[in-house]
Image (spheres, coloured by chain):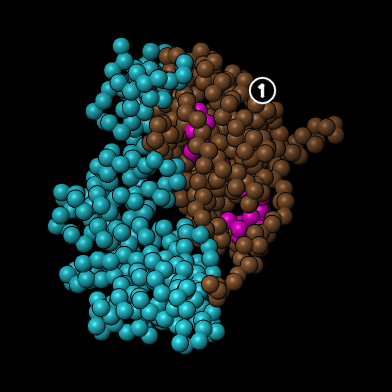
Chain colours: A cyan, B brown
Amino acid sequence: MRPDPSANAPAPAGAAYAAAFSAALLEPDRKTPALVTGPAGKAAAKRYNVYRNNVTVSLINALAAVYPAVQRITGVEFFRAMARFHIRETPPISPLLFEYGQDFPAFIERYEYAQGMPWLADTARIERAWLDAYHAADAPALGAADLASVPPERLADLVFMPHPATRLVRSRYAAVTIFAANRKPAPVEDIDASQAEDALITRPEFDVVVRRLAPGQAEFLSALMAERPLGEAAAAALEARSDFDVGMGLATLIESGACASAHLGENS
Amino acid sequence: MRDLTAHPEWEACQPRFPAHPVAGLAGTSFKPQHLQAILARLKPRGFFEIHAENYMGAGGPPHRALEAIRRDHAVSLHGVCLSIGGPKPLDTAHLARLASLVRRYEPALVSEHLAWSTHETVYFNDLLPLPYTEATLALVCDHIDQVQEAIGRPLLLENPSTYVLFHESTMRETEFIRAVARRTGSGLLLDVNNVFVSATNYGVSPLDYLANFPLGLVGEIHLAGHVEQSDDEGEPLLIDSHDRPVAAAVWRLFERVVERAGRIPTLIEWDSEIPEWPRLEAEAAAAQEILDHAGSARRRSHAA
């Protein structure tokens, strides 16, 4: 009798309503579920569509709240169409909507109509990292004074523990510049998108800060975030970029509040 | 191994808040964009309601804002996605997060909806309706027992705005809600706008609904704006949109409720197209005036 195959799944008596009601929520082409009605024999089509509309519009709005720069770049109509596809493919599985859209950057990367904007997915990755940093656990950031007691000859053995908010996003495009320009109210000027850029996202206290990293710093910081000792991280960065400046790398690490703590490693 | 940074005080500095009263007061939804305007008021007044889920992140600015609000005001914690009305077991991780917010912020009121929002793994982000039957009554009561056990206090259950009816329903919403409260010991959150919206959508009288509603169990009232669309027959279909001022008809219903039930804490909900703070504050002041008037009217009638 029921057109909905999921209604055949075992459910306690009287509990089939949720499967039957929800099956068509994200499917505009499906018929109004037969279990609902209007009052006194009135139809339920437009009434049921209120729920369909609430679900889709509120989830599109949730993605727009996470990705305002992406929406500004694409324009509202483009963004909402793209978001609608993503929501039907990957609806949220958590009631914490500020965590929704983790897969949206990867979706943008393969979205047919976004192929002309190859930097859009990385811009989205920075926006996602921004919100993750915003909600991350509170912790004091490591300051320069915390390192004052380390003897110079032991500096290479220092191991840093990342601050809970710290994120690193590497891009083959000018994603940091594009992100920054599109999160400000000012008009966006021409940007050379072909320049590779790396972003460091931190939140030492209240405000999330997105920094563009100098060459080699991303290799340096990602090695440190993987809890490799300072000496090894500097070597990895120098191998990637011979012009990497260790002193500047360390200064960025401290100024940005990217670390919560540090300790001297085992091999001493 | 030696940690160069020890911050033991960081863990120990969980704030504790004063117990601000909520009785007889009007309040508003708390929106972060209003924080500075609210803190700049010379005399803190009223209470604020937050959607619990917005404060379930580990840390960051949302918690700083809520701490600042909570210092000077009573707070109402309003859950929007526990899915109490769904057939699936409650998400225990989510329930634990709610309980932890209750411990951390010591809210004056804790509420949730007679609705569901998650099925299988998908979270639909809407308050979806349920049929009113003996079977759903049993599962809603089980869920409320579980919530009240987790938070260690009674929950206020909110009557929903709905747009469809279920063929399988065997009882009226007021009957269902009354039975839930009786079986679980929960309190009720009476959303007067929802009463008006649903009654209009089903062509019944909101006064009849209120006459059947156990007003003595109401611990909080909600007021909000709605928008009018039309149903398949071209007749008015009201949508609970929370994006505009409270409608005149809803204010009149509210006055009737306050006359009968007394000065119940009353909240202006505004969640979309959010105005500047003074506009929202003015709506709360209008509700406060009705509450204050009811209080003095009652005192006069007792004195007579």
Q: Is residue A99 above or below residue A125?
A: above
Q: Position of residue B46 (x, y in %)?
A: 65, 50
- Which residue has dot 1 on it? B182
Name the element at disc 1: helix
- Rendered image quadrant of residue A40: top left
Task: Check residue A38 for magenta coloring.
Answer: no
Picture residue at 45% right of the left edge, 14% below the top: B168
**Residue type marked 1:** Arg
Task: Check residue B71 for magenta coloring.
Answer: yes
Q: Position of residue A165 (x, y in %)?
A: 45, 63
Kindly tell me whether residue B161 is visible in this rendering.
no
In this rendered view, identify the residue nearer to me: A54 or B180.
B180
What range of the chain is rendered magenta? Answer: B66-85
Q: Is residue B214 above or below residue B106?
A: above
Picture residue at 74% right of the left edge, 39% below the top: B295
- How many numbered callouts? 1
Is A102 on the left-hand or right-hand side of B255? left
Q: For mark 1, does the 10 Å Cα neighbourhood hold few (<14), some (14 to 19), or many (20 or more) residues? A: few
| Placement of the C terminus of chain B among the 4 image quadrants | top right
Residue sitting at the far front: A267
The chain letter for the residue carrying disc 1 is B
Q: Position of residue A94 (x, y in %)?
A: 42, 42
Picture residue at 38% right of the left edge, 79% below the top: A231
Picture residue at 28% right of the left edge, 18% below the top: A3
